[in-house]
């Protein structure tokens, strides 16, 4: 009941990826459990995922995909407003392993099923195997009846790009040109894939992201679209901050860019948390050692960023870390999204696993967008 | 997204189980794989399940629930018209471990989630554990958005009863009064459960079924409803046949019964296959030995019966065994279901596992029934 569309692309068929700020009718997530990424058997992270799911569900229905062994536990922890489904995964980053939804002028929706290799495959990926992650789009398509495009031979994760829904995509060179993804393709080949499968005309290239060792620099930690022509950029004035150069470079490139409509971008700045987020010795000690997975060590710095929020209908769900800048982040978003409710959710435990709210969610556009 | 309805029953809420001959909008099945029940790694049985699913799908959409390890294989074997879903199970008898659907006058549908214990639990059940089977109704409800009634403390399988949709249920004493199901309940208590959860007024009790060692005599091998007031009864004239006494007794009890509407039943006879169906030495040899499961031995007689058909909208899907009586069975059903297409499907491999087409399917009524 989920057909693979062979011999065509979304662009050829008139399908585009909408901006995250366009109407949605569903958000998909995956339940975290692997003990080599989530300390203490994943329990602290699970409670953070519950909070995120419940925050989203006030605005948009949520499906949580859960491995067999955690099904009953997740079903109880999540409460009855969340749809809990048995679908296996290797880890819980729906933005990256899940499908990207595209839509046409009639409101028909399809999925793009990107080739997924756990952020770098056997070159510098985070774990092996990723067989169950790779099946997620198939299983979601079967369950909820969406046909799909497959990009076999083209590796991409949803967290490595942001679109404005009007022909522009923003991404990073560090990630898309990384050795572990598509070393057989040049930059212009990769642009072609983005243009065909997201249905865009213009690729804005940033340099680096803030987590080179995990996602090879996903853009969704650094920049996000507020609406077409308006972006939010991670920012720090502290020259000694480990992310200083990255923020400067991102801001500079955005300032110099024009989008598919020929617009200069309006750029807003989002501060970093004042305090860096580290894994404690206790947390690191309670993380499983698994051969083939990246170990988590005490004092590893984690990519805490308020830019990794999710826009979902009338809500914006934004990470909070117990930091003095938490309230600043909410205030900035309130200014940028005047009609929406800004909901802060404590997500330190999600950051310890390598991402945040945007990384663990994947929105499905409403069929009422036209 | 699938709420448990507490403190009520279908009867109290005005929901009833429709007859199988009423309109359906879906049929659920489970993919077979366990090597201690299905010889040769389940492959021969899987091909029979594929044939059954495809036969049904001509009349009614089919969802196949598949364990993680068989997902990709099942997805390919079934072809793209079947919806293939990852939902775990311990074995593949959707009639028994799956939900029973009930409907009200508005066309709203709910599920009954019977307590399931693998046909007798630790007394004389067929395998241990049955934890994943028990979760099937929850997971189907979550996936397809149906609330459900649970009967904790009351064990029942869907294959142990047939309803006419007008207030009558037919069942067997051998099964419902068996020691491994509800030994704490008397016959009248059990009648009360049937009346409350199926919304019936009259229970017609038969004696025995034809597979005492497996299901403790499920009725769906012996009798089936054609329409309200009309039944089909397994039959043999051969006094030496192992099922002779069972058929005689079933026919006699049906002859003496009246249904909830006060009608005498019109009873038609369905012959047995002329040749008994046995597991061969080769097949038995290729069946896994698992502690706690009933072993399959060469020359075990299998309950081959044409009564174990599925009625689904304009089709009747009926077992075929390569027996001289195969065509007789089809002819009888053609006479009884004049507006429907009778589709025979070779199912010897399913019989070797202990059941047939009715046992491996569960229909969902259409919301258009009122």
Image (cartoon, coloured by chain):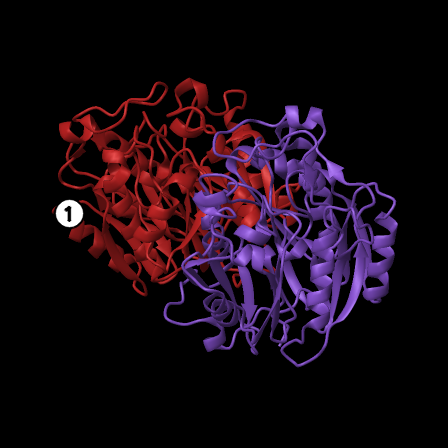
Chain colours: A red, B purple
Residue B268 pos. (x, y %): 80, 64
Residue A85 sits above or below residue A349 on the image:
below
Residue identified by numbered label 1: A325
The answer to which image quadrant residue A240 occupies is top left
At numbered mark 1, what does the secondary structure look like: helix, strand or loop? loop
In percent of the image, x 70 and y 68: which residue is there?
B254
Is residue B202 visible in the rendered image? The answer is yes
Characterize the local packing of mark 1: few (<14), some (14-19) or many (20 or more) Cα atoms within 10 angstroms.
some
Is residue B313 visible in the rendered image? The answer is no
Give the side of residue B156 with respect to residue A341, left or right. Answer: right
Q: Quadrant of the C terminus of chain B?
A: bottom right
- In this view, the residue farthest toward the bottom is B262
Residue A358 sits above or below residue B147 on the image:
above
The one nearer the camera, A142 or B209, is B209
Residue A353 pos. (x, y %): 28, 34
Residue A311 pos. (x, y %): 36, 54
The one nearer the camera, A150 or B319, is B319
In percent of the image, x 56 and y 71: which residue is there?
B103
Exactly how many numbered labels are in the figure?
1
The one nearer the camera, A309 or B350, is B350
The one nearer the camera, B155 or A180, is B155
Give the side of residue B135 with respect to residue B165, left or right. Answer: left
In percent of the image, x 21 and y 32: which residue is there?
A244
- In this view, the residue farthest toward the front is B239
Task: Give the letter of the chain under mark 1.
Answer: A
Q: Quadrant of the N terminus of chain B?
A: bottom left
In percent of the image, x 55 and y 35: which residue is there?
B294
């Amino acid at each position: 009941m989920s057909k693979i569309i062979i011999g065509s692309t979304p662009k050829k068929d008139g399908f585009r990826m909408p901006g995250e700020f366009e109407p949605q009718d569903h958000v998909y997530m995956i339940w975290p459990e692997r003990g080599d990424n989530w300390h203490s058997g994943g329990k602290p992270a699970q409670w953070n995922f519950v909070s995120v799911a419940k925050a989203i569900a006030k605005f948009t229905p949520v499906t949580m995909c859960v491995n067999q062994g955690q099904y009953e536990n997740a079903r109880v922890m999540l409460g009855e407003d969340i749809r809990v489904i048995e679908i296996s995964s290797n880890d819980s980053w729906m933005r990256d392993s899940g499908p990207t939804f595209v839509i046409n002028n009639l409101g028909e929706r399809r999925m793009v099923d990107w080739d997924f290799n756990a952020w770098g495959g056997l070159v510098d990926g985070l774990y092996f195997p990723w067989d169950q992650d790779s099946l997620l789009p198939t299983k979601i398509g079967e369950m909820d009846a969406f046909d799909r495009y497959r990009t076999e031979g083209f590796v991409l994760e949803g967290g490595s790009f942001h679109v404005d829904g009007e022909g522009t995509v923003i991404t990073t060179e560090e990630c898309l040109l990384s050795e572990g993804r598509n070393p057989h393709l040049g930059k212009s080949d990769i642009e072609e894939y983005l243009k065909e499968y997201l249905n865009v005309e213009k690729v804005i290239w940033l340099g680096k992201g803030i987590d080179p060792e995990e996602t090879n620099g996903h853009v969704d930690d650094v920049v996000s679209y507020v609406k077409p022509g308006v972006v939010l950029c991670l920012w720090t004035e502290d020259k000694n901050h480990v992310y200083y150069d990255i923020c400067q470079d991102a801001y500079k490139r955005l300032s110099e860019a024009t989008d598919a409509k020929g617009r200069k971008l309006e750029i807003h700045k989002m501060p970093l948390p004042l305090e860096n987020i580290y894994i404690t010795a206790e947390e690191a000690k309670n993380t499983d050692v698994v051969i083939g997975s990246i170990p988590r060590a005490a004092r590893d710095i984690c990519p805490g960023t308020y830019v990794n929020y999710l826009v979902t209908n009338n809500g914006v769900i934004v990470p909070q870390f117990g930091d003095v800048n938490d309230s600043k982040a909410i205030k900035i978003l309130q200014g940028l999204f005047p009609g929406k409710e800004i909901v802060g959710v404590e997500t330190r435990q999600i950051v310890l696993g390598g991402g945040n709210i945007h990384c663990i969610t994947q929105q499905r556009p409403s069929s009422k967008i036209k």
